[in-house]
Image (tube, rainbow, N blue to C red):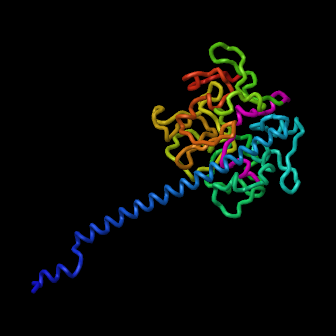
Amino acid sequence: MDSPTTARRSAGFTLVEMLITLAIIALLMGLLLTGLRSARNTAREGRQLNNLRQTYTAWGMYSTNNNESLLPGFIDTGVQNYWKVKYRNSSGQTIAPELCQTYTWRIAGYLDYGTELFLGYLDQPGMDFSTSIYQAGTRPYSMPPGLAPAETLAGSAAALQPEFGLNAYYLGGWWEMNAGVPAMRFIDAKHPTTNASIIPVARSVAQVTRPENILVFCSSTYSDPGTIKGPDEAASGSAWVVPPWLGVNQIWEVGGGGLDEGSINVLSAQAVPLRRFNSIPWSAADGSARTATFAELRDMKAWTNRQDLTGTQGYGSVHTEN
């Protein structure tokens, strides 16, 4: 016959046993949540790459329909007026030129004005390509003065906060009025050491010398100076993206003295590559879509149209401002 003490012990768990059970449940829940989070990020990365390919397709269709000219990266309102170009929405209405400075409204028609491709990452049901405004984005951030007038216009979220940024300075060119005429940034660039004239910008499909290596689009965000650590799925997108160097000005560098591939130090307010989930999705001029780290994108050979760069030559300034 069991003693009273033995009977009491067999009637339930001891405190230690209960704590061990709870710890095991917490561990299993942690593993489950980690697995679910990883699966969710993998699915969202897949969606990113799919949207990236479709955005690239529209970029290519623009060239096909415009005598192989590359989509201009940026056209300020003065240049649009000088060139007498106008863009229309799905209803045939003329779009405000402030919205057409960046690339999105200029290729929207090739994508049937699809909200998902440009603004789906914001995860805001009911957001419309034509009526959404800049403030609808997930996080307010600074904006260059030339684009500030677009912030309150209907359609500004699509113009200023798309999921992917275009390599706007080096593909198609960054156009602004200068002394009464359109001028493309870096049109008079020179080699930083020999002072020989070079052409780092491609304006047509035929001028892209290394299509398999030249970045067209990648996930991006406009950032003030500071450090961006780790992935940030809530960051607002940007309509363009820049390499670590623009002319002789360094814009960003890999964090941790070049050793931390998961972070960057932004040195000058600009639109920079963004690791929204596990890595940075980007498309090349040959239509391929892949992922990269900040360390891989610090090489200017992935951005400029110069084919003479070898080895580590792309890790610094590769041309002058003019």
Q: Nearer the viewer, residue 43 or 228?
A: 43
Instruction: Determine if residue 222 is in view.
Output: no
In the image as oriented, which residue stretches furthest toward the bottom? Answer: 1
Q: Residue shown at 65%/40% (left/top)? A: 288
Is 73 located above or below residue 99 in the figure? Answer: above
Tag count: 0
Q: Is residue 52 left or right of residue 32?
A: right
Q: Is residue 78 above or below residue 37?
A: above
On whether residue 177 falls in the magenta region, the answer is yes
Residue at x 75% of width, y 24% of height: 187
Q: Which residues are magenta?
A: 155-181
Quadrant, the C terminus: top right
Q: Residue at x 43, y 62 (%)?
A: 32
Across and down, in percent, residue 244 comes to 59, 32
Q: Left of 177 or right of it: where is 315?
A: left
Does the magenta-highlighted stretch encompass residue 293? no
Q: Position of residue 83 (x, y in %)?
A: 88, 36
Residue 102's place in the image compared with 139, above or below, is above
Residue 77 figure quarter: top right
Using the rendered view, name the quadrant where residue 44 is placed: bottom right
Return the x and y of residue 87 as percentages of the image width and height: 85, 46
Q: Position of residue 166 (x, y in %)?
A: 69, 40
Q: Quadrant location of the N terminus?
A: bottom left
Whether residue 239 is visible to the viewer of this picture, yes or no, is: yes
Viewer-side residue, 226 vs 188: 188
